[in-house]
Structure formats: structure tokens, C-alpha cells
């Protein structure tokens, strides 16, 4: 159920990107590297550099909004929990993070 919700949020974000008016103001942030597009935009082979940059900017903006919503959801759900439940949740998350790190370090050569 949780992943279905995020799939729906991602779909809505992509729909918003598709139908949103493009910003006419230039970005004030310097480009660190060429824009790396995600699918399906990466499959369009004849995009100009300006189009690539604008699509990447929209993607970045929406990704930031999704992250903010995810953080808000986490904060609001944690506020519902009791102190004991929050402590148990934090312990579970810490354990899972440690397991992922251990698994990741086993995959790295060397």
C-alpha cells in the first residue's frame, strides 16, 4: 500500500510536469554538470541544450517537492506515535540502515 501511494504521487508529479507552464525566468544556479534526464525524456534524441536544462530543472523542482511531502508525512505520522512507539521505530530504522550499509560494503570490491 505504501509503495502504491508513492507511485501515485510520482505519477501525479509527472502529470504536473507535463501540463505545467514552463518557467520563463532563467535559473540563477550555475550548472554543475550537463543535465541527466530520466525516462521518458532521455529517450527524446533531438532535444536542444535549453530543452534538456529546462526539463531537468522541472524534474529537480518536482523531486524537491516530493521530498518535502515525504518529510512532512514522516513528521506527521511520527507525531501520532507514542514515545515508546517512536523509540521502537527509530531503533528499527537504525537497524535496517546498518543492515543496508553492511550489505552494500560486502558488494564493493576491495
Image (cartoon, rainbow, N blue to C red):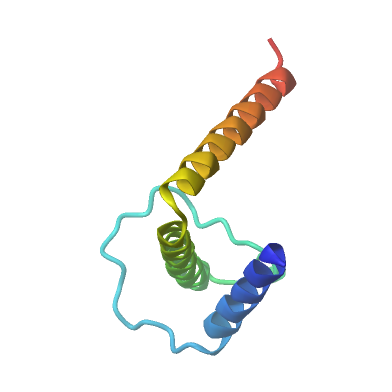
Q: Where is residue 99 in the image (x, y as percent from the top left)?
A: 66, 28
Q: Where is residue 96 in the image (x, y as percent from the top left)?
A: 62, 35
Q: Residue furthest top?
A: 110
Q: Position of residue 60 (x, y in %)?
A: 46, 64
Please determine whether, in this image, residue 27 is positioned above or below residue 88: below
Number of numbered tags placed on the structure image? 0
Q: Which residue is drawn at 47% across and 56% down?
A: 81
- Please state, as top left, top right, bottom left or bottom right, where the C terminus lies in the image: top right
- Please state, as top left, top right, bottom left or bottom right, where the N terminus lies in the image: bottom right
Q: Is residue 41 left or right of residue 65?
A: right
Residue situated in front as seen by the camera: 80 or 16: 80
Residue situated in front as seen by the camera: 21 or 107: 107
Please determine whether, in this image, residue 19 is positioned above or below residue 109: below
Residue 80 visible in rendering: yes
Quadrant of residue 94 in the image? top right
Quadrant of residue 36 in the image? bottom right
Amino acid at each position: 500500500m505504501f509503495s502504491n501511494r508513492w507511485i501515485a504521487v510520482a505519477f501525479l508529479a509527472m502529470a504536473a510536469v507535463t501540463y505545467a507552464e514552463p518557467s520563463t525566468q532563467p535559473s540563477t544556479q550555475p550548472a554543475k554538470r550537463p543535465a541527466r534526464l530520466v525516462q521518458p525524456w532521455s529517450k527524446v534524441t533531438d532535444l536542444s541544450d535549453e530543452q534538456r536544462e529546462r526539463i531537468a530543472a522541472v524534474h529537480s523542482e518536482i523531486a524537491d517537492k516530493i521530498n518535502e511531502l515525504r518529510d512532512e508525512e514522516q513528521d506527521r505520522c511520527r507525531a501520532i506515535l507514542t514515545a515508546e512507539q517512536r523509540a521502537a521505530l527509530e531503533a528499527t530504522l537504525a537497524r535496517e540502515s546498518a543492515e543496508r550499509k553492511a550489505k552494500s560494503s560486502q558488494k564493493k570490491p576491495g
